[in-house]
Image (spheres, rainbow, N blue to C red):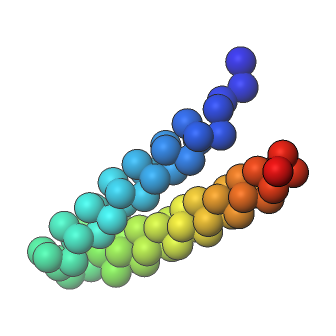
Amino acid sequence: MPNNPDQNQAKMIEAKANLVQKLLEASENPKPSYKIDGQEVDWKGYIKMLQDAIDRLSTLIASEEDDWEEMSQWYV
């Protein structure tokens, strides 16, 4: 059964809110990037990844809203 567009948008909005919360937490308690035992922890990269994901979700949410507005005009 296909997902309802409203449900998809709600899930994207929830995912964005979760990512924003993680970004706020990471920004409030910044940590240095480091390597240990051959593993790298890149906090700046993590913050950038969160910001990029938030930007992509914002774009998707906006495009779904635009699509919804266009579709609703068909029925007017």
Nearest to the observer: residue 67 or residue 75: 75
Q: Which image quarter: residue 44?
A: bottom left
| Whole-percent x, y for residue 73 in the image | 81, 56
Quadrant for the N terminus in the image: top right
Q: Residue at x 27, y 79 (%)?
A: 33
- The single residue placed furthest to the front in the displayed view is 76
| Whole-percent x, y for residue 10 in the image | 49, 44
Is residue 19 in view from this perspective? yes
Q: Which image quarter: residue 27?
A: bottom left
Q: Residue at x 52, y 72 (%)?
A: 55
Q: Which image quarter: residue 69?
A: bottom right
Is residue 42 in view from this perspective? no
- The single residue placed furthest to the left in the displayed view is 29
Q: Residue at x 12, y 74 (%)?
A: 29
Nearest to the observer: residue 38 or residue 62: 62
Q: How many marks?
A: 0
- The single residue placed furthest to the top in the displayed view is 1
| Whole-percent x, y for residue 53 in the image | 50, 65
Q: Is residue 57 left or right of residue 60?
A: left
| Whole-percent x, y for residue 68 in the image | 71, 53
Q: Is residue 74 above or below residue 11?
A: below
Nearest to the observer: residue 71 or residue 53: 71
Q: Is residue 12 above or below residue 33?
A: above
Q: Residue at x 59, y 40 (%)?
A: 6
Q: Is residue 20 above or below residue 48?
A: above
Q: Is residue 69 left or right of residue 52?
A: right
Q: Is residue 25 left or right of residue 40?
A: left
